Image (cartoon, helix red, strand yellow):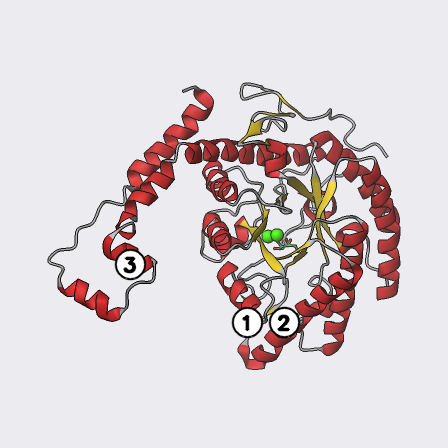
């Protein structure tokens, strides 16, 4: 099969290039803060959106035109693998991610599905030998098939709990076989629609058991990828158990799982939860649980998971501000869990989409790095909290006070003075950094 043969290797040509098939800001070998952009950003292509997605929506059938359209069944699965590795090579992307059902059709039994997986995983392994692209993470889809109508690890049906466990078992084996650096758990239908028919305690306890068994099995087979939980507040269920980082962390602690997991944070899930992307990244960072990122964006006017490719430079900059201060993402990366719009149906659009995503994060990396180097935000924050550097503030943070001493101090206060939060000034400075980073200082 000849896929994408009208497209050459995508290269960095710089900010003034007019070539739509070139990076304007993502320069893989450019060193930022001691690391190359490629090492910092660890981009991944999401197999489901780029190779499996047909761009259908609840109101219309798929519109995507793809080089593998003439195939079906296992031939389709094979054609997709072939095309995927051509795509990775042309884009120069270091990682990819997939669900089991993205790479193979489900068989008529679990056994047959596993056989399909064995065939395609062996093929992917062969392709990976000659490719620079590695597996950032894999996962299993325990939400699309009707058997998961009431959930998977939180299903009301014990047979489904077993089935879901068997799929994750296979997923871990696949991850080990392909050298996955992480394994993701997104609880697609691990939540509920109504409490009127739900045993919440049993469901949560079962999820806790499910994760412990996954941890045990990974240890048993020597799979050393990082386990990641991906929070999402709703969609498809009304109430998801892993609503956001804070509730996910409460769950992990309650079931004594916190040492085995980190979080995979998706921008669009953060906004669905009523948070900003940077809020979720910051929360995970400060509790030492920032593992990986699903790099996309929602639409400000739509209340669902639109999974757009990231293009908002302010957003990518504030995200990179967190990631740099986290010391990077370790084993994690920036996975484009993003799909082209339904109107962008040509194979070329897949390249344009990844180019805008990669360039947007490259801009974010450069601007955020300058903001950090010049201590723009840190100075503001330090000054704002300087009352904790001495006197009563220092006593509070060093644990030398109690309510008696604080009351005595408060009774002696005649006036409380504040300093301005300076938000408008900060935003003006950030804008200045955007322009001076690229237009010249
Ligand atoms: C869906 C999720 C999903 C996970 C992997 O909203 O983002 O794609 O990333 O199962
Ligand atoms: Ca995701
Ligand atoms: Ca999503």
The residue identified by callout 3 is 395
Q: Disc 1 on helix, strand or loop? A: helix
Circle 3 packing at 10 Å, graded few (<14), some (14-19), many (20+), is some
Q: Nearer the viewer, residue 60 or 152?
A: 152
Q: Residue at x 73, y 24 (%)?
A: 8
Q: Disc 3 on helix, strand or loop? A: helix
The residue identified by callout 2 is 208
Q: Is residue 322 left or right of residue 151?
A: left
Q: Is residue 425 left or right of residue 314?
A: left
Q: Is residue 275 visible?
A: yes
Which tag, 1 or 2, sits closer to the chain's start? 2
Image depth: mark 3 or mark 2 in front: 3
| Image quadrant where one finds the N terminus | top right
Q: Disc 2 on helix, strand or loop? A: helix
- The picture quadrant where one finds residue 382 is top left
Which tag, 3 or 2, sits closer to the chain's start? 2
Circle 2 packing at 10 Å, graded few (<14), some (14-19), many (20+), is some
| C-alpha separation, residue under disc 1 versus residue under disc 2 | 9 Å
Q: Residue at x 29, y 55 (%)?
A: 394
Q: Is residue 235 left or right of residue 138?
A: left
Q: Position of residue 279 (x, y in %)?
A: 45, 51
Label 3 CB sits under 8 Å from any ligand 2 atom? no
Q: Position of residue 407 (x, y in %)?
A: 20, 68
Badge 1 vs badge 2, beta-carbon distance below 8 Å: yes
Judge whether 29 appears above or below 291 on screen: above
- The picture quadrant where one finds residue 45 is top right
Residue found farthest to the front = 400
The residue identified by callout 1 is 254
């Amino acid at each position: 099969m000849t896929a994408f043969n009208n497209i050459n290797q995508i290269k960095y040509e710089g900010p003034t290039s007019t070539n739509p098939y070139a990076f304007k800001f993502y320069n893989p070998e450019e060193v930022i803060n001691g690391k190359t952009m490629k090492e910092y950003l660890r981009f991944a292509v999401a197999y489901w959106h780029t190779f499996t997605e047909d761009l259908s929506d609840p109101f219309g059938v798929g519109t995507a035109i793809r080089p593998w359209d003439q195939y079906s069944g296992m031939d389709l699965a094979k054609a997709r693998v072939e095309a995927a590795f051509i795509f990775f090579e042309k884009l120069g992307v270091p990682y990819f991610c997939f669900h089991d059902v993205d790479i193979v059709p489900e068989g008529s039994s679990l056994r047959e599905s596993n056989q399909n997986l064995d065939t395609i995983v062996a093929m992917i392994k062969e392709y990976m030998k000659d490719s620079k692209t590695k597996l950032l993470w894999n996962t299993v889809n325990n939400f699309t098939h009707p058997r998961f109508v009431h959930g998977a690890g939180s299903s009301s049906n014990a047979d489904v709990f077993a089935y879901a466990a068997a799929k994750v078992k296979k997923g871990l084996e696949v991850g080990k076989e392909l050298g996955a650096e992480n394994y993701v758990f997104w609880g697609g239908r691990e939540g509920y629609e109504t409490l009127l028919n739900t045993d919440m305690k049993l469901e949560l306890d079962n999820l806790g058991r499910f994760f412990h068994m996954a941890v045990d099995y990974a240890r048993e087979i020597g799979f050393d990828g990082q386990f990641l939980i991906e929070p999402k507040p709703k969609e498809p269920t009304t109430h998801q158990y892993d609503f956001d980082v804070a509730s996910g962390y409460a769950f992990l602690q309650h079931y004594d799982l916190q040492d085995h997991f980190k979080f995979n944070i998706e921008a669009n899930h953060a906004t669905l939860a009523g948070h900003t992307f940077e809020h979720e990244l910051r929360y995970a960072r400060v509790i030492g649980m920032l593992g990986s990122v699903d790099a996309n964006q929602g639409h400000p006017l739509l209340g669902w998971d639109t999974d757009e490719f990231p293009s908002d430079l302010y957003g990518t900059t504030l995200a990179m501000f967190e990631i740099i201060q986290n010391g990077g993402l370790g084993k994690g990366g920036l996975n484009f869990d993003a799909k082209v719009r339904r109107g962008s149906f040509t194979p070329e659009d897949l390249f344009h989409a990844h180019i805008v995503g990669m360039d947007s994060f490259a801009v974010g990396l450069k601007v955020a790095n300058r903001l950090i180097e010049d201590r723009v935000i840190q100075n503001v924050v330090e000054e704002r909290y300087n009352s904790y550097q001495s006197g009563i503030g220092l006593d509070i943070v060093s644990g030398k006070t109690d309510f008696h001493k604080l009351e005595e101090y408060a009774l002696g206060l005649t006036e409380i003075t504040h300093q301005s939060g300076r938000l408008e000034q900060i935003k003006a400075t950030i804008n200045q950094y955007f322009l001076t980073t690229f237009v010249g200082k």
